[in-house]
Amino acid sequence: MKKKEIALVLSQKEIAPRIYDMWIQTQLAGQARPGQFICVYPRDRATLLPRPISVCEVNRSRDALRIVYRVAGAGTEEFSHYKAQDPIAIMGTLGNGFPVGEAVGKTVFLIGGGIGIPPILELAKEMDAKKQILLGYRDSNTFLREELEKYGRVYVAAEDGSVGTRGNVLDAAAKNCLEAEMIFACGPMPMLRAVKRYAGEKGIKAYISLEEHMACGVGACLGCVVKTKNLDPHSHVHNARICTEGPVFLADDVEI
Amino acid sequence: MNTQVTIAGVTFQNPVMTASGTFGSGMEYSEFVDLNRLGAVVTKGVANVPWPGNPVPRVAEVYGGMLNAIGLQNPGIQVFMERDIPFLKQFHTKIIVNVCGKTVEDYIEVVERLGEEDAVSMLEINVSCPNVKEGAIAFGQKADALYHITQEVKKHAKQPIIMKLSPNVTDITEMARAAEAAGADALSMINTITGMKIDVHKRRFAIANKTGGMSGPAIKPVAVRMVYQAAHAVKIPIIGMGGISTGEDAVEFLLAGASAVSVGAMNFADPCATIRVLEEIEAYMKRYQIEHITELIGAVQE
């Protein structure tokens, strides 16, 4: 059940340059699944639209939900100034989330790139599998790395070579001679394209979480679509709504 | 307190409607608002066949509003009749279907199909979408073309027709008069204002279509002005829209001469916006002891 509510900021800190880590007290925590997202509404009406931000972690017994986001514009800039006990307008939980159960007992890659890393945390926490976690960063600001190490073996790649393997997440997989039966990934489009290609070559299933500019977040505006192999259930035109049919898709089902 | 308004013989329980394209067919927002309380649901545009729409990015935020170039993605009239109409029929609200097309024949095909459905109260003819290359806007920016399509659609329509006007014209009164002369039962205005946004960091257009239609609170003064001008040029009723985010915004449109109002982009900023606007209109009526909402229509003092 989707709901809009005025929730409460529990805490916030900057964990890497312009990357913020916020815990929110909300009734939505109980239903949040890994790979889902919430919409956060700026107070300033000059920034009209909600910001879709993925669920990073949930603490259901404390009704707490965590988001980790990058300041990218006026909306996220506003959020970054929120302090503990401030109200925050949110709506959720949105999207389908990762099919965690499909991984049971399998050897998997959990791949996160840049600001696509946060949803991998709750995914890793809830997944019962042999988890090889591949994280791609720009530089040595390896946010969330230590926390992810609690849930699986972590391999890091950095574009500038300052830490881990120089290059991208798949370079890290190759360098460490890693193999997987299944992939779950979230990150920038070039990374997801590479993951899709890799999974295709290896003949393994890959679930990828996509993002696109959206307006409503609930499937009404048709702003955030992705080309799909099969007819989409809403408009029947091979254009699925990322906010509603996604954000997680089988890599094989989408043209990216 | 009486909030009923009548447009072209159709009575609405209140003047609050949804602006086409911002509310789907109501399904997505029924989790947030009670559709039974709306004056009408105006659906997303539907064509004779499915339309895939434009490439992404399709939306971008601008100061106090947004640009969109969805390109009228829709499943076509067949799916719409089988899925969306039965869904909306469950609710105690009027159904207005927005009709789009690339040729006059496309429009007529959809209008005739909708004529079979008694639950549809009115048809809103979209001749003003700025984001579709052929058809649509081509009919809405020249008075003679608007006259022609209005006349053709009117000949085949069983329900009263609302012509949705584009603000992207030199003289809105000329367009309003052309639609009225050709037999339109009502007007709705304004559609989005053509705009552009360039991402200076990427040095690219913010939306793939380069141009998009601007909506949101920032366009409201333009919309109020056009509704006022059109209301003084024609006798047929007007459904006003463009940046309405509060009940007082809605009242402003009524005072300018609109008989009803639509909430559009604000649905994105607040999924409960329609009902909130309705409640705020009622609060305004109470505050100023307005017995019947029609007292407000065109009541701005000169």
Image: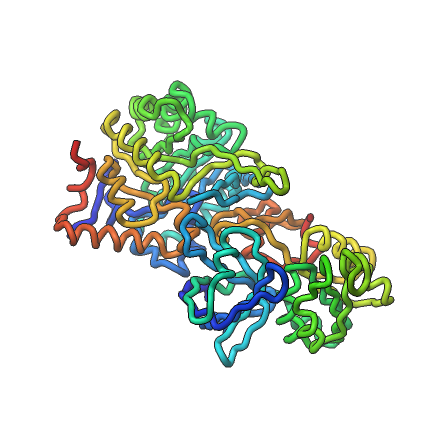
Residue B23 relative to residue B230: left or right: right
Q: Visible in this render: residue B112?
A: no
The location of residue A227, given as percent across then percent down, is 64, 47
* Residue A242: quadrant of the picture: bottom right
> Which quadrant is home to the C terminus of chain B?
top left
Q: Visible in this render: residue B100?
A: yes
Residue A209 relative to residue B88: left or right: right
At horizontal 66% and vertical 72% (from top left) the residue drawn is A101
Q: Is residue B161 above or below residue A242?
A: above
Tag count: 0
The location of residue B144, given as percent across then percent down, is 39, 18
Residue A48 relative to residue B238: left or right: right
At horizontal 26% and vertical 47% (from top left) the residue drawn is B248
Q: Nearer the viewer, residue A222 or A52?
A: A52
At horizontal 31% and vertical 55% (from top left) the residue drawn is B276
Q: How is the image coloured?
A: rainbow
Q: Is residue A9 above or below residue A210?
A: below
The location of residue B13, given as percent across then percent down, is 24, 49
Residue extending farthest top: B144
Q: Nearer the viewer, residue A110 or B145?
A: A110
